[in-house]
Amino acid sequence: MFFKEVSHGQVLVEALLGIVVSTAMLAGSAALINSSLKLNKEGGKGSAALALAQEGMEAVQAIRDTSWHNLYNPPDGAGASSNKGASYPYYVGKSGTTWVLTTDTADKDITVDGLVYSRVVQIDNVSRDNSTRDIVTSGGTNDPATQKVTVTVTATGSADVALVQYFTRVYTHSPWQQSSWAGGSGQTSWSDTAKYDTDDGNVNVTGTVGTIKLEAQ
């Protein structure tokens, strides 16, 4: 029968090695947990930003469905059709239960779980090739029945989210038809089919319906 003698010193070394290995494993597990929590937190921020961008685009669609002019002449149908692009940021807000375009920065920021997200709507006119009618980025002819909308959401610690969609005037949006201007000037939005914005005093709009005459000088 053989016996192996093990010294107390060897047992102590083996115990210390076991503690070191266990500590390293625990540290590694903690690092993995922290990384996972960080990724989950960042993923949550990204999901919130995407949801806000999608909500913004749905709001623009609702605005388009209500009135094409509010989209083409932002923000309320009375703006200039050229007030678009990066220099003219818009936001979406609520008037009662209805989505509206606004220029009020109070509608820009939305807080979700303590984090402030900024949502901006950019509207751009669209041009089409005269032959193919394809959308082009240069040249072509302006298409008043198509608008490009970009909704961008930003937040500290979250990647920016930008959604792009082209909106077209739907069949329910009949073109504005007007054959009388007898109501006179003072109309700044498309609402009264007998009125207009301004004139220089040299036109006669009170004659035969459907006609405008220049006054004799």
Image (cartoon, rainbow, N blue to C red):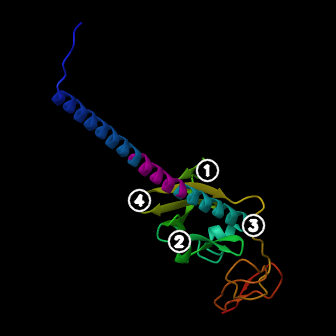
- The answer to whether residue 138 is seen in the rendering is no
Q: Quadrant of residue 14?
A: top left
The numbered dot on residue 175 is 3
Q: How many marks?
A: 4
Q: Decide: marks 4, 2 in contact (CB < 8 A)?
A: no
Callout 2 environment at 10 Å: few (<14), some (14 to 19), or many (20+)? many
Name which residue lies at 71% across and 71% down. 98
Q: Quadrant of residue 61?
A: bottom right
The numbered dot on residue 133 is 1
Name which residue lies at 54% across and 61% down. 151
Q: Rounded to the nearest whole Å, what is the CA distance between mark 1 and mark 4?
A: 42 Å
Residue 39 location (% of width, % of height): 43, 49
**Front tag of 4 and 3:** 4
The numbered dot on residue 108 is 2
Is 156 magenta? The answer is no
In the image, 109 versus 149, the foreground residue is: 109
In the image, 117 versus 128, the foreground residue is: 117
Residue type highlighted by circle 1: Arg
Q: Considering the numbered disc 1 on the image, is that residue within a helix, a strand or a loop?
A: loop
- Of marks 3 and 1, which one's residue comes earlier in the chain? 1
